[in-house]
Image (cartoon, grey):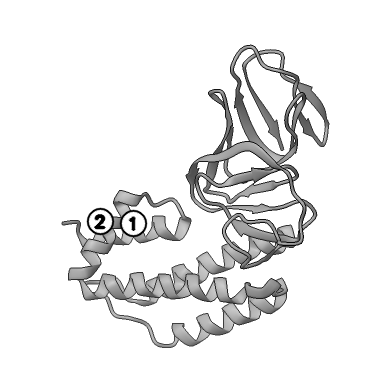
Amino acid sequence: MISCETARALIDKAIDGTIGKAEHAELEAHAETCEACRNELKCLEQTEEVIADAFASRTEALQAKNQIMAHISERVGTPTQHTGSVPGYWTWTRTAIAAVVMLAAGLTLGFVLGREGQNQPPASAMLQEAPVRIGRLEGMVLVKHGNSDVWQPVRSGAVVYLGDTFHSMPRAAFVLDLGNNSTIDVSPNSMLALVSYGSETEFSLEQGECTANLQSPHGPFFVRTPHGRIEALGTEFTVTVE
């Protein structure tokens, strides 16, 4: 059984969105026997629910911010006590920071979050499915389809559509499985869009970094950036946009 100190470190990772399945299971097992850590974990879960509710139904970012901050203000006034020297105020300070970080990312991108299903396009959208899937996923990655202004959380194994734009949070990363043992690894704090796929494949990297590992031989493959258009002549290369 893990200690309370280790549990608090895992809660940190949960806030960052970098906690693994095995670690999360250990945290939940510890929380079942420790009331203080269970309360801290519950506070984190409640804050995540508030963030999701605040952005439901295409809520504007400013309105969502007001809802989140009002909720945090209420909860900070009644902190949970942790056995030992660490007060429960630690929890709500950190979860408040997590909320603000997520919100700041949203305000920077100008996104709104919808509840149209995990990585599912709007019913009215006529999108073309690509033979690409989400592979390894670490942390929070968002996607918007085509010309939609709705960003949704991505799940591992999800379908990718032409026109999809992906945004990895500062501590998140993911892999696009292109089939035939070809992949694109996308680094944290990156924005990558699938422009075309087939006889000619093209991605657009707006910011961040991606590394392509392509099976040889491969067809025409391009990565567009704000500074130019790069053609893959080999099988492995990295593109960075600062």
What is the x, y in percent for residue 29? 22, 62
What is the x, y in percent for residue 15? 45, 61
Residue type beneath disc 1 = Leu
Q: Mark 1 points at which residue?
A: 10
Residue 212 figure quarter: top right
| SS state under label 1 | helix
The C terminus is located in which quarter? top right
Residue 51 figure quarter: bottom right
What is the x, y in percent for residue 169? 58, 51
Residue drawn at 56 percent across, 23 percent down = 180
Apparent side of residue 52 relative to residue 238 in the rendered image (left or right):
left
Residue type beneath disc 2 = Glu
| SS state under label 2 | helix
| Dot label at residue 26 | 2
The N terminus is located in which quarter? bottom left
Which residue occupies the foreground of this view, 146 or 240? Answer: 146
Residue drawn at 41 percent across, 70 percent down = 44
Badges 2 and 1: C-beta atoms under 8 Å apart?
A: yes
